[in-house]
Image (cartoon, rainbow, N blue to C red):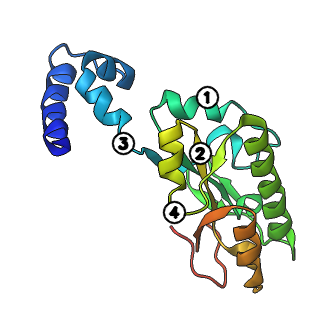
Amino acid sequence: MAGLGVLAWTGGAGTLFGGCGKVQSGAELLAADPEIGALVGSTVGIDMHSHAAGANARLKATYDLAERIPTGRMTAVCLSHPGDAPVIRREPDNRIRTVRQPEPGELWRFTQRRLKWFDELIAEQGLRRALRRGDLDAAHRDKAPAIVQTIEGCQFLEGRLERVAEVYGRGVRHLQMVHFFRSDMGDNQT
């Protein structure tokens, strides 16, 4: 039945999108068809990669993420900070480049500050962390916005694998092996 709903929705979306030449917002589409709203509402929706609310490197959250997650009909976001942020820059041509080598311990200290930022965000905004099997289903059931805490790039390890257990203990559940900065873990993603 859900498959039929998706097929019906995609056919209807063509009419909504193409019929009047104006692209409707997601909220307008959901309001236009209660069946679509019910289907979306029954789904555990997860943004699989987000730097929302200043997760990259802001000192404080730039907005209320806990308010925006349900507004977007999401259950959770995989909220990420790039572990190599202190040594990379976006160039005028929009490419991201490594601009210098990190000082010993610099990326670990940066990671520690970001983990503290996540702790504060969760406490201040009432977000849940998805830490184990079933947490996303429970967040969806309870209509409680959640995050899956993520780090892009393992440069903070600096050859110390015990740090994986440390960041896991701080709530990280998705650890991307490489990002834009070359390391012992691998080449950069570009």
Which three-letter amino acid code belongs to the residue tagged 3?
A: Thr
The Cα atoms of the two marked residues, 2 and 1, are separated by 11 Å
Q: Is 41 in front, or is 158? A: 41
Mark 1 falls on what kind of element?
Answer: helix
The Cα atoms of the two marked residues, 4 and 2, are separated by 13 Å
Which residue in the protein does label 4 denote?
A: 133
Foreground label between 4 and 1: 4
Which residue in the protein does label 3 denote?
A: 43
From the viewer's perspective, is residue 100 above or below residue 66?
A: below
Which residue in the protein does label 2 denote?
A: 146
Disc 1 crowd rating (10 Å Cα; few below 14, some 14-19, many 20+) is: some
Q: Earlier in the sequence, mark 3 or mark 1?
A: 3
Which residue in the protein does label 1 denote?
A: 67
Quarter the N terminus occupies: top left
Residue located at (56% from left, 78% from top)? 187
Disc 2 crowd rating (10 Å Cα; few below 14, some 14-19, many 20+) is: many
Q: Is 16 in front, or is 179? A: 16
